[in-house]
Image (cartoon, rainbow, N blue to C red):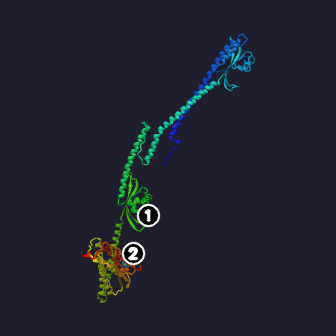
Amino acid sequence: MEKKINFFQSVHFKIALVFVLLLLVSVEIIGAIFIRELEQTTITNFKTNVDVQVEQLAANLSSELSSEEDDDVNLKRLVNDFVQNDILEVRVIDEKGIVRATSEITDQNDVGKKNDYGSLTNVNEQGIEQKDAVTGKRVYRKNQQIYSPSGTTVMGAVYVKSDLEAKYKEISNITLIFFTASMIAMGISVTIAILVARGITKPIGEMQQQAKRIANGDYSVKVDVYGRDELGLLGETFNELSDHVKEAHETLESERHRLDGVLSHMTDGVVATDRRGKVIIINEMAQLLLDTTPEEALTKNIVDLLGIDPSYTFRQLVEEENERLIDIIDDKDEHTILNADFAMIRRESGFISGLVCVLHDVTDQEKSERERREFVSNVSHELRTPLTSMRSYLEALSDGAWQSKELAPKFINVSLEETDRMIRMITDLLELSRMDNKKLVLQKELINLNEMFRFVIERFEMMMMSQNLNYTIKREFTGRTIWVEADSDKLIQVFDNIMNNAIKYSPDGGQITCSLLETHNNVIISISDQGMGIPRRDLRRVFDRFFRVDKARSRAMGGSGLGLAISKEVIQSHGGTIWVESEEGKGSTFFISLPYVPMEEEDLWD
Ligand code: ADP
């Protein structure tokens, strides 16, 4: 997620702000002290200066006032001369309180009149600062008594008004200059502060960007090193760090690729989990075996993924199991049996960080193991039945039945029949075993299939006649003579078996249809009956060893359940296929397809 820093929270802003505030505070303090000092000195100097001048004037006026001359020409000249620069007004009063001279042109009428500024007695020699009543400007008023030259008597007083406003104006001008200068300084310092802050925050910002890129897996860009200061060193170290991370990442990646390569080329399925049992790795084979996708598997716990009883926890799996068989049933109801080997992943500290499960498809082994067990039990069962029955007859004979002319031959006959059945079965089993061990060598020759099939059918017709059976056999033969390369004895055995079954499992009087047709490169032989048929669910199983739809009935008919199994092996060893179509209660059709290459008649004699 992109983290955006608010400008006002940034280091950049904070540094600049600190700079500016520092400067502002110091400038303010310096300014305040400076201006205050300036103001005090200027005003005090001014006042002292005025005071001295006024004292001087008073001394000069003293001699003028004491002179006997009647006109005050000199007095007036002194007064007028005094008014210059900062002095605004001068008024001289004699001891009677009469105005003797004034510098104000507009007040000339007051000369010779009683002064309205106040009497001599309350002349305040202390200068005062006040606002001028007329102009409203600040002025400094200084009253000075005029003593006689001897200094004994008061001869009058002089009033002086000086311009303080101009001084204040001067000070405020200086303040303005100071303020402007400090503003300029502030502006410059803000710029410097921003630049300095940028100098610090830019490398930091770059490093932050780079760290983000590294986090996203991009190691290509380096941060710029701007100098040999702490930030420069940090940048260098950061680049080194980035190189290390890159190397570590590359090593890790190549390890991961190697592991991925190994895992994906493994013929066993591998599932790895974290310490809570959540799937973190699943290779292609495991996906195939468990019929899942990585997206689906990676959200699951291994207990759910393997379809182990949900009451079983991951902890139990870790503690108890080394190996277990897992039966997986797919949509088509087909079972896959997997052998799951479990191993814990332990850290050096002994801490369990997960579990590895190796899955191996053992469906075939399990199936053949199951078949072997079933086969042994079937064989034992099949042999036990005739043996038990023989034993009971032999027992009866030994108990005295041998003396009975009626019973003895019957019992012996049954025993012989049972012995024959056992011999037949063992012969069949031996044959199957030879086929299983690939010891059966086919005596292949070129056979006229039409002729051979006809021969089998005719034999059955004769057999039926001798046994008074009324089946009709219908022939549907192709007009073409079919020549195939095959072991004729074995093929006859197959035809016999299927014809036999057609008679065994259909009622007398029914029709059996034998057909022989050729397609482009196959010859199809089919034998249909109108018998009891085979339930749909058993259609595929009738070719299994010892499988019988109705055990009792089949056994009563002398069947062992091996005939079709042998037929299937024979046809398959000829490169053909055998299958059955059937409708229960209506009849069954057995099909045999054999590879066939159509040949011209004369080719045979080449
Ligand atoms: P069996 O010796 O029992 O006949 P097979 O291997 O020849 O042994 O046949 C296996 C089973 O298939 C029989 O037990 C029977 O249930 C069934 N089957 C075979 N052929 C037919 C058929 N034409 N009609 C009905 N069921 C049949």
Q: Which mark is residue 552?
A: none
Relative to the observer, which residue lies in front, 329 or 186?
Answer: 186
The response on whether ligand 1 sits within 8 Å of label 1 is no
Q: Secondary structure at mark 2?
A: helix
**Residue identifier under label 2:** 538
The response on whether ligand 1 sits within 8 Å of label 2 is yes
Kind of residue at badge 1: Asp
- Left or right side of 276 for 414: left
Residue 506: horizontal and vertical position, in percent? 38, 82
Kind of residue at badge 2: Asp
Local crowd size for mark 1, using a 10 Å CA cut-off: few (<14), some (14–19), many (≥20): few
Quarter occupied by residue 226? top left
Which residue in the rendered view is the most extreme toward the left? 606
Relative to the observer, which residue lies in front, 420 or 18?
Answer: 18
**Residue identifier under label 1:** 309
Q: Secondary structure at mark 1?
A: loop
Alpha-carbon span between mark 1 and mark 2: 31 Å
Quarter occupied by residue 71? top right
Residue 171: horizontal and vertical position, in percent? 60, 26
